[in-house]
Image (cartoon, grey):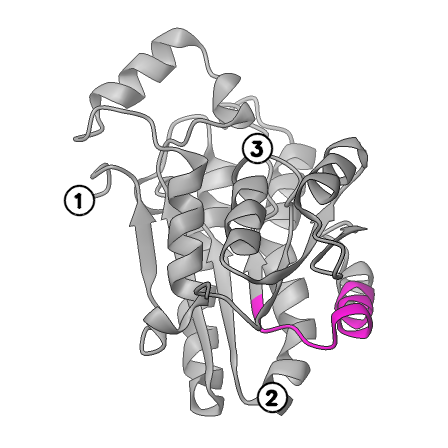
Amino acid sequence: MGLLDRKTALITGGSRGIGAAIVKRYIAEGAKVAFTYHSSSAKSDALVAELSNGDNNIKAYQSDASSYEQAEALVKNVIADFGQIDIVINNAGITRDNLMLRMSEQHWDEVMTTNLKSVFNLTKHIMRPMLKARSGSIINMSSVVGAFGNAGQANYAASKAGIFGFTKSIAKEVGSRGIRCNAIAPGFIATEMTEELDEQTKEAFLNGIPLKRWGEATEVADACVFLGSDLSKYISGQTLSVCGGLNC
């Protein structure tokens, strides 16, 4: 038996990077998985084809995490297709890096809307089903950058720091109804996003990591399995850093 047998998970931004790693680990642990993609369906279609067992165990949905209305429709559609949602992973996120002097209002708004408002959107719409079930695990993807900041990422750091407070507040609001809410704060993980960094920046980051290596997306996925499973049933309102000691 897997750690997530008989559980259904909804994962935003699940077609690539950390999101895709979470989807794969959840399927491997026995969960049924609904995941979202924003635009192109090529990667999500390939992921479904790779992981489908022919028993309605996985489905991809095109949905904009920053849209309140689309989040509402998404929850309704997933419940109609799967019958329940036990775990929500708010993983969708973007970067629009620049020094504050050069950062546009548009790039500030895009990051705050996609990274932070999206967490509100999906959490808002999953509340009633989870309250009715008197159970559920909400996992919000933050970042160590939200804890200590980073030059050129004021928008990203602010959005990820906001997730810390949001997570604690939700945990206090709904804990009495059996719903847990936690955050994960990855450090520097080897993904398509980090590949965009220049070599000098990569080396500087690497030198600051006590374990002296980049993290793997699968290691973040492992933390999501823990927080989604009954292994963490007495853990709520916490942030688990997956950062190789960077935030110690």
Q: Quick check: 151 above or below 18?
A: above
Please tell me in which quadrant of the rendered image residue 239 appears: bottom left
* Marked residue nearer the N-terminal end (3 or 1): 3
Please tell me in which quadrant of the rendered image residue 74 appears: bottom right
Quadrant including the C terminus: top left
* Gap in angstroms between the C-alphas marked 3 and 1: 24 Å
Of the residues tagged 3 and 1, which is closer to the observer?
Answer: 1
For image coordinates 76% across by 67% down, the residue present is: 78
* Marked residue nearer the N-terminal end (3 or 2): 3
Specify the segment rendered in magenta.
Answer: 73-87
- Residue position for label 1: 248
Marks 2 and 1 close (CB-CB < 8 Å): no
Q: Which mark is residue 155?
A: none
Assess disc 2: are there few (<14), some (14-19) or many (≥20) residues with their C-alpha within 10 Å of its C-alpha: some
* Marked residue nearer the N-terminal end (2 or 1): 2
Assess disc 1: are there few (<14), some (14-19) or many (≥20) residues with their C-alpha within 10 Å of its C-alpha: few
* Gap in angstroms between the C-alphas marked 3 and 2: 35 Å
- Residue position for label 2: 133
Indicate the secondary structure of the residue bearing disc 2: helix
Instruction: Locate residue 125 relative to residue 9 in the image: left or right.
Output: right
For image coordinates 36% across by 16% down, the residue present is: 202
Q: Is residue 236 visible?
A: no
- Residue position for label 3: 95
Instruction: Locate residue 157 relative to residue 36 in the image: left or right.
Output: left
For image coordinates 70% across by 52% down, the residue present is: 53
Q: Quick check: 203 above or below 228?
A: above
Q: Main secondary structure of the magenta part?
A: helix
Foreground pick, 60 / 46: 46
